[in-house]
């Protein structure tokens, strides 16, 4: 019910995440009634790497995503790369899809999904095994927008992993 939705609608922030092989969506706004912040994420081989579907506050009508802030996101080999987004009603900067950049296998150290089963580090983070990490010379290195996170080089890299 619309009366149960908080005012203002809270913003979610999704940053430095990796989504791989999800049947429907890797990153999904999930009918949120407001926009979210999407920073430095990487999607690989999802049904849709980025689905920004929103719902109007009356909770009746789904609409293309609005009020999202998306910067430095990367995707590769999605069934669809991005869908259900109203570009004019979002702030998009330095994402592979709004820069018209197309990834290839050569952009990555490794795309071997079996590496995802390797044990995580003691702090819970992913192991340093090269999966979806940018290879030296990748077109996505230094193509990001400085949004306040630490980075190496002239500008942030696209995706969840800063090139070493």
Image (tube, rainbow, N blue to C red):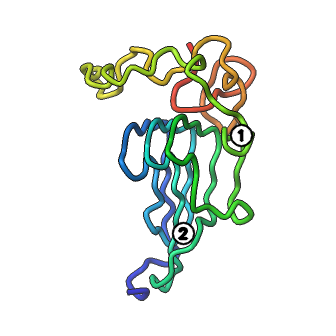
Q: Earlier in the sequence, mark 2 or mark 1?
A: 2
Neighbour tally class for label 2: few under 14, some 14-19, many 20 plus, Cα within 10 Å: some
Q: How many marks?
A: 2
| Residue 150 % position (x, y) | 60, 27
Neighbour tally class for label 1: few under 14, some 14-19, many 20 plus, Cα within 10 Å: many
Q: Quadrant of the C terminus?
A: top right
Q: Foreground: 82 or 4?
A: 82
Q: Secondary structure at mark 2?
A: loop
Q: Left or right? Give the position of 129 relative to 62.
A: left
| Residue 132 % position (x, y) | 48, 24
Q: Residue at x 32, y 25 (%)?
A: 116
Residue 3 in which image quadrant: bottom left
| Residue 74 % position (x, y) | 58, 36
Q: Residue at x 66, y 38 (%)?
A: 96
Q: Which residue is mark 1?
A: 94
Q: Which is in the foreground here, disc 2 or disc 1?
A: 1
Give the CA distance from mark 2 to mark 1.
Answer: 22 Å
Residue 135 in which image quadrant: top right
Q: Residue at x 54, y 69 (%)?
A: 34
| Residue 147 % position (x, y) | 67, 39
Q: Which residue is mark 2?
A: 34
Q: Foreground: 67 or 43?
A: 43
Q: Foreground: 47 or 116?
A: 47
């Amino acid at each position: 019910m619309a009366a149960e939705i908080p005012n203002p609608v809270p913003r979610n922030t999704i940053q430095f995440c990796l989504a791989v092989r999800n049947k429907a969506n890797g990153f999904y706004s999930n009918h949120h009634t407001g926009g979210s912040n999407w920073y430095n994420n990487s999607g690989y081989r999802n049904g849709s790497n980025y689905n920004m579907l929103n719902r109007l506050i009356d909770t009746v009508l789904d609409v293309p995503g609005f009020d999202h802030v998306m910067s430095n996101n990367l995707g590769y080999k999605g069934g669809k790369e991005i869908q259900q987004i109203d570009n004019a009603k979002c702030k998009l900067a330095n994402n592979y899809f709004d820069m018209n950049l197309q990834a290839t296998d050569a952009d990555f150290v490794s795309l071997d999904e079996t590496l995802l089963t390797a044990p995580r580090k003691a702090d819970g983070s992913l192991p340093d095994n090269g999966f979806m990490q940018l290879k030296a010379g990748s077109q996505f290195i230094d193509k990001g927008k400085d949004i306040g996170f630490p980075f190496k080089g002239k500008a942030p890299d696209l995706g969840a992993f800063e090139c070493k």
